[in-house]
């Protein structure tokens, strides 16, 4: 099976599972899944977040998701328990479609690592 087909199948399974768990079956979009990863990484699941905190959660998620690719490295947790990352390598300039594929690939890898999907 080609890598693209496998990624597509895993992505669809992941969206289906997360949507059933967090959105009453309404399909979650990429940004919503990135947000969920941020909440998971912060570990403060039952908290209401302000708009700027939501953006910070998405930043945490992107750093964590791209860490295995060598773009970011975990640095420390601050006094409020928020993780901080340092940039190891600048992200290459990617077209919108390429960015989406990279993020989907990173998200699928993350949820495989967490044993949420296979």
Image (tube, rainbow, N blue to C red):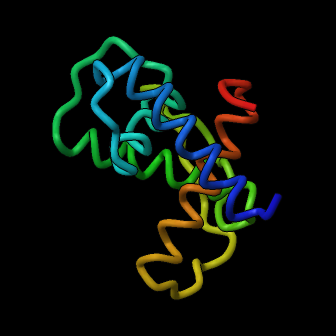
Residue at the spot x=50%, y=46% of the render? 61
Q: Is 52 situated above or below 105?
A: above
Q: In the shown orientation, is residue 10 left or right of residue 98? A: right
Which residue is farthest top? 46
Dividing the picture into quadrants, the one containing residue 117 is: top right
For image coordinates 50% across by 72% down, the residue present is: 99
Q: Residue furthest front?
A: 1
Is residue 12 found left or right of 105 in the rendered image?
left
Rendered-image quadrant of the N terminus: bottom right
Image coordinates for residue 21, horizontal then vertical, percent? 41, 17
Residue at 40% across, 20% down: 20
Query: Image check: 48 left or right of 92?
Result: left
Quadrant for residue 73, please give it: bottom right
For the C terminus, the image quarter is top right
Report x, y in % for residue 23. Answer: 29, 24
Q: In the rendered image of this protein, does residue 19 appear above or below residue 30?
A: above
The answer to which of 36 and 73 lies nearer the viewer is: 36
Residue 69 placement (x, y as % from top left): 73, 63
Give coordinates of residue 83: x percent, y percent: 54, 39
State left or right for residue 89 relative to residue 78.
right
Front one among 79 and 115: 115
Image quadrant in which you'd find residue 19: top left
Q: How many marks?
A: 0
């Amino acid at each position: 099976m080609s890598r693209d087909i496998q990624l597509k199948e895993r992505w669809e399974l992941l969206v289906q599972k997360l949507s059933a768990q967090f959105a009453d079956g309404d399909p979650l979009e990429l940004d919503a899944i990135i947000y969920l990863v941020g909440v998971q990484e912060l570990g403060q699941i039952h908290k209401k977040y302000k708009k700027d905190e939501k953006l910070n959660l998405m930043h945490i998620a992107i750093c964590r998701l791209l860490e295995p690719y060598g773009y970011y490295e975990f640095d420390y947790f601050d006094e409020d328990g928020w993780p901080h990352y340092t940039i190891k390598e600048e992200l290459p300039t990617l077209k919108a479609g390429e960015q989406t594929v990279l993020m989907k690939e990173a998200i699928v890898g993350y949820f495989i690592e967490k044993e949420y999907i296979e």
